[in-house]
Image: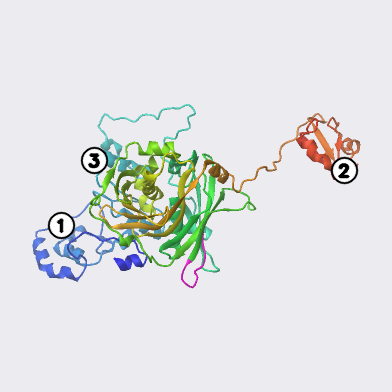
């Protein structure tokens, strides 16, 4: 396990007491064949695709010898899924008490050709009818036919959706944020990430560029991260972007990441993202920078650099593997009452919505803080697509705010500098968190899963106060105060309407040649243009700079 983690593979130990799919099974071969000798396999009405053979087989052959082989030989899971994809299947539904294969199927889909979706049914602690009906709805919205007559009582009937009067509230689920289009056809690779659309390796220098597009329409959950009355991309999202870029470049550790400018998201705004990874130096370290600018901005508009840092080729140093906990809460830790915690945060400027209210329990032991954090709803369902979901890591930081002074006047505190970030197991939807003070006001953070196994760690995180004025100024970074805009000019019946000023030509000679009647403010010189536009008597509505007209 340690070698896999050191090699940047996502792996975790399975809690079983026997070694399947290996030579150890041969010791119980005769015992298994005897125990299973009474099996009488039957022909199946539904095609059966075996992970023993990797292909479709006749179920009448599922005898004792088959099941022994199933336990002894390697599992040809990816081969079976790829074969089904090749037959044009568009949906895979895992029927189990908790979806553990959906992630593996999804990875096979990403590597294969064509498009498909992987879905679950029940979940751990969610095994009732409501969860199953929700799974049916998810399948139906992905194009899987559902016989709703069998899902509801016989007297159930369909109804029309209610009308509404301009509230602009959608009935349908918001999009996943995935970028439409064929990235491969554009010479790019699909980034396979909710915040990024495409990735490309730079031909000269061994660097990488990952691109994406963000808005509150495509990623509505980000609207729940409002600070000082402003919606901004959480600092944990910049960490996620850098970690994903590190995966692309073969770097398993984010050595450092400094945030320079907040990325504000307005209700109608959309921004283009670029995550740029530089070439490797002699120590296999690479630079990483995160940029944005308004989507559709002209080519000459500069990009804003929001974060910069360094990626390392291996997960060395103090990392997540150095902390694991099975006893929870830890011995000697005293519970912290969280009633009213998020309303109190809102009073101090942290207006977190449901997607970011993931802190559900906290304890203190000396200078250490412990917490349980959890994603709910759509964020929980989509956690497997992230290395470490930004809302989950952000919820861990909310425990740090328990020690903040409610009367502080220097602004809210936001992540500023991250050091030594490693992810041991991706896709977590819940986590146990330990927070310890490091140098100055910085903290170290460790996250583990429900079984105490390492998920991620941050060697050092420094937070810095940010005022409302600073956030408002950040929203103007890269924007022009004024822009030139071409508009229509009204000419009614050969007569110039409005207050005009002419620069650089004779009124009578120029306008008379066009058959237009001049009723403007008169002829002005070039030095008077500012006066003509901004005031100094009757301000001009239109200034015409005439280079010359020939009669």
Q: Position of residue 496 (x, y in %)?
A: 81, 31
CB of mark 3 within 8 Å of CB of mark 1? no
Q: Position of residue 366 (x, y in %)?
A: 30, 51
Element carrying mark 3: loop
Are there few (<14), some (14-19), or many (20+) residues within 10 Å of tag 3?
few
Whichever of callouts 1 and 2 sits on the residue coming sooner in the sequence is 1
Magenta stretch holds residue 279: yes
Which residues are the magenta region? 276-285
On the image, which quarter does residue 49 sit in?
A: bottom left
Q: Position of residue 428 (x, y in %)?
A: 33, 52
Whichever of callouts 2 and 3 sits on the residue coming sooner in the sequence is 3
Magenta stretch holds residue 280: yes
On the image, which quarter does residue 127 sit in?
A: top left
Residue 531's label in the rendered image is none
How much space separates mark 2 and mark 3, taking CA atoms? Answer: 82 Å
390 and 334: which is toward the camera: 334
382 and 244: which is toward the camera: 244
In which quadrant will I find the C terminus?
A: top right
In which quadrant will I find the N terminus?
A: bottom left
Name the main secondary structure of what is drawn in magenta.
Answer: loop
Q: Which residue is mark 3?
A: 128
How much space separates mark 1 and mark 2, taking CA atoms? Answer: 96 Å
Residue 41's label in the rendered image is 1
Element carrying mark 2: loop
Q: Which residue is mark 2?
A: 549
């Amino acid at each position: 396990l340690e070698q896999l983690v050191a090699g940047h593979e996502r792996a975790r130990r399975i809690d079983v007491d026997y070694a399947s799919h290996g030579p150890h099974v041969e010791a119980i071969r005769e015992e298994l064949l005897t125990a299973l000798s009474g099996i009488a396999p039957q022909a199946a009405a539904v095609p059966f695709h075996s992970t023993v053979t990797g292909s479709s087989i006749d179920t009448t052959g599922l005898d004792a010898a088959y099941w022994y082989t199933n336990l002894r030989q390697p599992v040809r899971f990816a081969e079976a899924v790829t074969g089904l994809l090749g037959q044009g299947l568009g949906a895979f539904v895992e029927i189990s008490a908790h979806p553990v294969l959906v992630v593996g199927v999804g990875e096979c889909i990403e590597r294969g050709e064509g498009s498909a979706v992987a879905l679950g049914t029940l979940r751990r602690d969610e095994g009732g009818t409501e969860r199953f009906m929700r799974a049916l709805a998810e399948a139906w919205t992905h194009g899987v036919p559902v016989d709703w007559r069998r899902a509801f009582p016989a007297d159930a009937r369909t109804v029309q959706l209610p009308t509404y009067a301009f509230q602009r509230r959608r009935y349908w689920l918001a999009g996943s944020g995935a970028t439409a289009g064929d990235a491969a056809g554009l010479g790019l690779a699909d980034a396979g990430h909710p915040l990024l659309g495409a990735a490309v390796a730079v031909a000269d220098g061994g660097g990488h560029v990952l691109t994406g597009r963000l808005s509150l329409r495509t990623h509505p959950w980000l609207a729940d991260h409002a600070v000082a009355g402003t919606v901004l991309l959480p600092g944990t999202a910049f960490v996620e972007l850098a970690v994903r870029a590190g995966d692309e470049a073969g770097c398993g550790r984010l050595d450092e990441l400094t945030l320079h400018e907040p990325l504000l998201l307005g209700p109608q705004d959309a921004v283009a993202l670029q995550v740029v990874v530089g070439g490797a130096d002699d120590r296999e370290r690479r630079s990483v920078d995160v940029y944005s600018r308004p989507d559709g901005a002209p080519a000459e508009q500069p990009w804003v650099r929001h974060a910069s840092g360094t990626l390392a080729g291996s997960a060395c140093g103090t990392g997540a593997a150095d902390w694991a906990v099975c006893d929870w809460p830890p011995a000697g830790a005293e519970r912290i009452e969280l009633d009213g915690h998020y309303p109190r945060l809102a009073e101090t400027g942290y207006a977190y919505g449901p997607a970011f209210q993931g802190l559900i329990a906290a304890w203190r032991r000396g200078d250490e803080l412990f917490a349980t954090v959890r994603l709910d709803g759509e964020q929980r369902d989509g956690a497997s697509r992230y290395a470490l979901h930004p809302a989950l890591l952000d919820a861990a930081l909310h425990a740090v705010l328990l020690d903040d002074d409610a009367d502080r006047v220097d602004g809210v505190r936001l992540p500023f500098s991250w050091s030594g970030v490693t992810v041991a197991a991706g896709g977590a939807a819940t986590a146990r968190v330990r927070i310890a003070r490091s140098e100055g006001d910085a903290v170290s953070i460790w996250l583990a899963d429900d079984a105490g196994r390492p998920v991620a760690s941050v060697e050092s995180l420094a937070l810095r106060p940010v005022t409302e004025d600073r956030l408002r100024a950040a929203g103007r970074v890269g924007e022009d105060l004024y822009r030139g805009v071409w508009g229509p000019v009204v000419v009614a019946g050969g007569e110039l309407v409005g207050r005009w000023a002419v620069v650089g030509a004779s009124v009578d000679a120029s306008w008379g040649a066009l058959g237009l009647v001049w009723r403007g403010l008169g002829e002005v010189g070039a030095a008077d243009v500012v006066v003509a536009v901004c005031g100094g008597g009757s301000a001009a509505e239109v200034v015409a700079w005439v280079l010359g007209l020939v009669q």
